[in-house]
Image: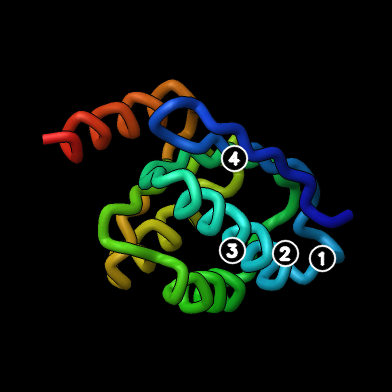
Amino acid sequence: MSYQYTITECGDYLRVEVHGSRSGTDVTRESLNMWQIVAQQCQQKGINLILAVFHLSGSRDIMDTFNIVEGVQEWLWPELAIAYVDMNAENSKENTIVEHFAMMHGINFRIFFNEDEGLRWIKAMYSTHRH
């Protein structure tokens, strides 16, 4: 099953909600397709903040992680900040690697384990960027 996602404009940020499975899916391709559309919508609307909430089953291969982080580089800009909420607790170890790798590549990207924490961080980023 490919990723199913919705993108909602929530004032100062975009909320992306993703459902599906990583099993039997080209994770790199699915992710890059989705992130490109999200980046385009952010740029069209002048939004620099993303709250991404993932409900995906299955694990992400480390090579997919590297390929996704490398692949999104051309769509990023310095003011962009991404709060990544993974509702699958089994991915916490993988997500630590994702966060570290993204930050090493200059992506303002943080992992959260619930939506409230991610939203709090996004709101703090908004107030920081306004001044």
Image marks 4 and 2: residues in contact by CB distance under 8 Å: no
Marks 4 and 2 sit apart, C-alpha to C-alpha, by 14 Å
Whichever of labels 3 and 2 marks the residue nearer the N terminus, that label is 2
Kind of residue at badge 1: Thr
Nearer to us: label 3 or label 2: 3
Image marks 3 and 2: residues in contact by CB distance under 8 Å: no
Which residue position holds label 2? 30
Q: Is residue 16 left or right of residue 98?
A: right
Around disc 4, counting alpha carbons within 10 Å, would you say few (fewer than 14), some (14 to 19), or many (20 or more)? some
Marks 1 and 4 sit apart, C-alpha to C-alpha, by 19 Å
Q: Secondary structure at mark 3?
A: helix
Kind of residue at badge 4: Val
| Residue with the most extreme left position | 131
Around disc 1, counting alpha carbons within 10 Å, would you say few (fewer than 14), some (14 to 19), or many (20 or more)? some
Whichever of labels 1 and 4 marks the residue nearer the N terminus, that label is 4
Q: Is residue 69 above or below residue 58?
A: below
- Write down the quadrant of residue 127 in the picture: top left
Whichever of labels 2 and 1 marks the residue nearer the N terminus, that label is 1
Marks 2 and 1 sit apart, C-alpha to C-alpha, by 8 Å
Kind of residue at badge 3: Gln
Residue appearing at x 71%, y 45% in the figure: 56
Residue appearing at x 55%, y 71% in the figure: 68
Q: Secondary structure at mark 2?
A: helix
Which residue position holds label 1? 25
Marks 3 and 2 sit apart, C-alpha to C-alpha, by 10 Å
Which residue position holds label 3? 36
Give residue 66's position: percent from left, percent from top.
50, 76
Image marks 2 and 1: residues in contact by CB distance under 8 Å: yes
- In this rendered view, identify the residue nearer to me: 11 or 128: 11
Residue appearing at x 44%, y 76% in the figure: 74
